[in-house]
Amino acid sequence: MLQKSRSSSSKSLVFSCPPRQKFILNWINTLTPCKPLSHSELAEKFRTGVFPLTILQALKLPYRFSSTKNPPKSREDCLSNLNTFLLALESKGLSVPPGFNLLLYQGKSQACWEIVEFLFTSLYIPEILEFSDEMFTWYSNTCQCEISYAEGLVLFKDGSLILRILNEFGSGPGPGPRQGQGFYEYPESKAEIFQNLENIEKILSKLSVPFLFSPEEFYLNDQGECLLVQLWLIFKHFDEKANKNFTKYSTETSSKCSFIQYDAGVIESKSSADLVERKIVNEERKLMYLSELRTGFELNKGKKGIVSVPSVKEIPHSSSQPVLTNSEVLICYLLTPRIIQVHIQGKLQRVLVNFIPNESKFSLKSEKYLLELRELTQMHTVFVCEIEEIQNFDCQGEEMRLCVRGQPIKLVFKTVDECLKYLDGFEYLLEKY
């Protein structure tokens, strides 16, 4: 069995389960210009060593080109190609036992899959992970909500975020299904999810971006690295397209002027409070969505199904619904950190005041928040409490006095208007409780 050498784990590579094998086979088929190979054809294709070397070229892995034989004319030529291939992998940390090239030459399926698994798991995935922060930042900015690797399987499961991104770049069907068109932004059944996934498959096919799953495989997938590869292919497509457009634009404009003048009004509009508020509302929506999923999982352990979150639809989340209610605008204001002064335990200091969702108690029906104060140098928490722990409060000019768990606290804001805004916020949240 193959093993990683040196700093890598000495454990044998695990033989893949069929769903994973099918995914990796689809991935392999995207790397070469050959016609798509079936599961049974892959090991046979490895025998001459030419196909494996083509994979190295696609992955931009170096090897001794001068020692290759193409086309191979004898058994020795095939073994020479396979030796060159395995030497290239040994330089990347794979320990190859004696005679392993013979197993590949004989078309042994398990030997072939151990090699393919190493290429995927130990070489391709780590390369993508190096750029994962950049990729998820791009997804977060496009969707206007924070997305991390850990949340990926949950947030991308129903296909709606991918379709929203495709729609953002003019490739998607647009939200609001009608007569088989459009997509479900918040699907509530398996049928609606499958319509989303089928739309993804069709759109990516038109864009010549490989979709490495069938809709059913995507729906059942529970492996983060497989999803990561699919998201990478989408990101790479639009990133390369953007870079080409930027290069073309730069070339065309460089001959006309030595610099580009930006419209200050446009820049201001893109960074306006409206966009910031909308982004914060999306953060709130995501927290509520994840909370509902966790709640549904606890209530339905062992059962498969989709947790319905219909009230999420009531919250504005896109340019087609730009208007926020007064209470939503107020929540956005409270969620934005601000520098104030606080008088607590006989000390006066400058802090960052912030309202944050209380994740352990937050749900669609019960929007619980924490009041948090952090000092500015080390950002250590000076004070934190649940909103419902505030016993009473009053406002005088720029100062607000609170009583929390019997402890007096005085908040000093920059202006009277700012103080009054927070007063409205406290009244709104405490009224809900």
Image: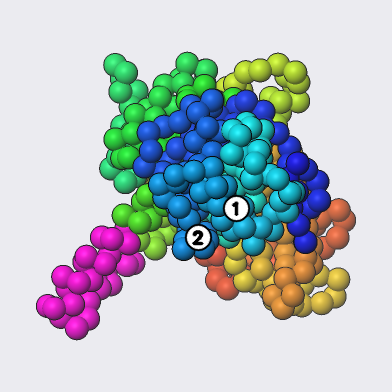
Task: Give amino acid for label 2.
Answer: Ser
Query: What kind of element bears circle 1?
Result: helix
Whether 251 is among the magenta residues is yes
Whether 342 is among the magenta residues is no
- Residue 300 in sight: yes
- Residue 164 in sight: no
Which is more N-terminal, label 1 or label 2?
2
Residue identifier under label 2:
67
Q: What secondary structure is the magenta-colored segment mainly? A: helix
Q: Are marks 2 and 1 in contact (CB under 8 Å)?
A: yes
Residue identifier under label 1:
83
Query: What kind of element bears circle 2?
Result: helix
Q: Which residues are magenta?
A: 242-268
Closer to us: 88 or 27: 88
Task: Give amino acid for label 1.
Answer: Asn
Horizontally, residue 263 falls left or right of residue 229, namely: left
Real-space Cα separation, disc 2 to disc 1, in angstroms: 9 Å
Residue at 54% across, 25% down: 40
* Above or below, comparing residue 55 to residue 217 in the picture: below
